[in-house]
Image (spheres, rainbow, N blue to C red):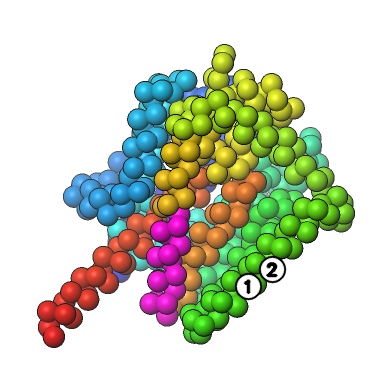
């Protein structure tokens, strides 16, 4: 698919914007900024939404959402939750941002091929990695953490885990770019090595595990593509891994001591238990989109502060918990249905697309799910992870529609 240089530049800049670079760490702990955001940053996102809508076209945007009804229902539920939200104005504002994020995702999937999107992502996150290195060299006091995680790089982001997740995803994108494009192979390999180094320096265990696991998954997917009968073997391997996980749970004190970590996942277990108690107060439709962790009085934040020592946590540090906290079991079920459909279509893409890009949907879905075990980016407005998830959904839907049209044309010809 041929697109203009201007559109390619916009795509790269939009992806970089959605990583939210250069966020002052002090602002993250400012309740007013945390709640309402910075006006200049919001303005940039609005420009991105509007530009994507104009470039894609209103009709094509409508068709994209029409073909993905589960995702549309989830976004509508988030918007309608202002009716029972603990902060209706905030829910409305964040609901608009959620819709805007989806529009940018529809634009990327509608105007660019899957391989192009991977290359844009490698470029955007390569820039973020390079800027982080420069920032660490020029201003180490502001870009290397010196409180709870002494020595961990945070680069141009507000926390080490954010930097780790971004550069780990960038490393995966660079790996795909190197494997699928001779033109950019050398620079992609260099970027992959540099990004992997930064992941280690960020001291983000989740990001490191997600990177290694994603790369290890690729040979398995290639074998599944060439030998469909191996699906059974791969499934048995997954069961073995789950069993190992259960064992690690029973012997967690030894495992985490070996990794130099604590068995509470840096306080997350206590936080998850507290979030579960808050969910039980409004189990069906939640506390309202984007308000589960903001507000005063008798709300989810107050409940979590009562039961958890981590009173300043910005989210549940678990994607599924965060969705349920905001939108209840209804939102949770809608998300699981959408994710399952995306995985199913990703498997079809794996079998029908012989290129390296055919592996990308399943790898990305796996990466995002794995990182959301300890972070919260599911259904997150203005988030790169959620933007890419939506892009994959729209891309797979577009491929499905194209396949159906081709099959119809063949049938008519016969």
Give the answer, above or below, for where 387 lies relative to 233. above
Write down the residue under mark 1.
236
Rendering quarter of residue 32: top right
Q: Position of residue 41 (x, y in %)?
A: 46, 34
Foreground residue among 86 and 193 = 86
Report the number of numbered marks. Answer: 2
Q: Position of residue 307 (x, y in %)?
A: 70, 25
Q: Is residue 42 left or right of residue 307?
A: left
Foreground residue among 46 and 222 = 222
Q: Secondary structure at mark 1?
A: helix
Q: Is residue 13 left or right of residue 179?
A: left
Segment colored magenta: 339-354
Name the residue located 30 percent from the left edge and 58 percent from the top edge: 110
Name the residue located 60 percent from the left edge and 78 percent from the top edge: 233
* Dot 1 and dot 2 residues touching (CB under 8 Å): yes
Q: Is residue 45 left or right of residue 197?
A: left
Q: Residues within 10 Å of mark 1 (few under 14, many from 20)?
A: few
Q: Give the distance between the C-alpha atoms of the residues marked 1 and 2, in whole angstroms.
A: 6 Å
Farthest top residue? Answer: 297
Q: Check if residue 342 falls in the magenta segment.
A: yes
Quadrant position of the N terminus in the picture: bottom left
Quadrant position of the C terminus in the picture: bottom left
Q: Position of residue 291 (x, y in %)?
A: 50, 27
Write down the residue under mark 2.
240
Name the residue located 37 percent from the left edge and 23 percent from the top edge: 83
Q: Check if residue 351 falls in the magenta segment.
A: yes
Name the residue located 30 percent from the left edge and 41 percent from the top edge: 50
Q: Position of residue 25 (x, y in %)?
A: 64, 33
Q: Residues within 10 Å of mark 2 (few under 14, many from 20)?
A: few
């Amino acid at each position: 698919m041929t697109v203009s240089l201007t559109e390619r530049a916009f795509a790269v800049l939009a992806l970089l914007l959605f990583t939210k670079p250069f966020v002052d760490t002090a602002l993250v702990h400012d309740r007013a900024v945390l709640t309402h955001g910075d006006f200049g940053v919001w303005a940039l996102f609005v420009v991105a939404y509007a530009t994507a809508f104009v470039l894609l076209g209103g009709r094509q945007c409508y068709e994209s959402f029409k073909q993905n009804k589960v995702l549309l229902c989830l976004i509508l539920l988030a918007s309608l939750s202002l009716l029972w939200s603990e902060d209706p104005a905030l829910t409305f504002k964040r609901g608009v941002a959620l819709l805007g994020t989806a529009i940018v995702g529809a634009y990327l999937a509608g105007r660019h091929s899957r391989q192009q999107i991977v290359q844009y992502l490698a470029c955007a996150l390569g820039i973020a990695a390079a800027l982080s290195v420069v920032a660490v060299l020029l201003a180490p006091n502001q870009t290397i953490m010196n409180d709870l995680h002494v020595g961990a790089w945070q680069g141009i982001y507000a926390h080490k885990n954010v930097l780790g997740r971004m550069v780990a995803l960038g490393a995966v994108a660079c790996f795909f770019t190197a494997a699928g494009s001779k033109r950019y192979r050398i620079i992609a390999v260099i970027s992959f090595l540099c990004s992997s180094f930064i992941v280690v320096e960020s001291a983000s265990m989740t990001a490191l595990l997600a990177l290694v696991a994603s790369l290890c998954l690729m040979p398995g997917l290639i074998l599944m593509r060439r030998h469909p009968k191996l699906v059974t073997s791969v499934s048995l391997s997954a069961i073995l891994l789950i069993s190992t996980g259960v064992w690690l749970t029973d012997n967690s004190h030894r495992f985490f001591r070996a990794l130099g970590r604590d068995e509470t996942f840096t306080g997350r277990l206590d936080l998850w238990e507290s979030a579960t108690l808050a969910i039980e107060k409004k189990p069906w439709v939640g506390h309202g989109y984007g308000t589960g962790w903001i507000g005063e009085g008798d709300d989810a934040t107050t409940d979590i502060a009562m039961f958890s020592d981590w009173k300043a946590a910005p989210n549940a540090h678990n994607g599924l918990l965060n969705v349920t906290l905001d939108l209840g079991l209804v939102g949770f079920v809608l998300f699981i249905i959408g994710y399952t459909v995306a995985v199913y279509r990703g498997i079809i893409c794996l079998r029908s697309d012989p290129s390296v890009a055919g592996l990308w949907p399943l790898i990305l879905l796996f990466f995002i799910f794995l990182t959301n075990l300890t972070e919260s980016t599911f259904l997150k407005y203005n988030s790169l992870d959620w933007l890419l998830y939506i892009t994959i959904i729209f891309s797979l839907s577009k491929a499905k529609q194209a396949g159906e049209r081709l099959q119809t044309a063949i049938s008519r010809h016969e």
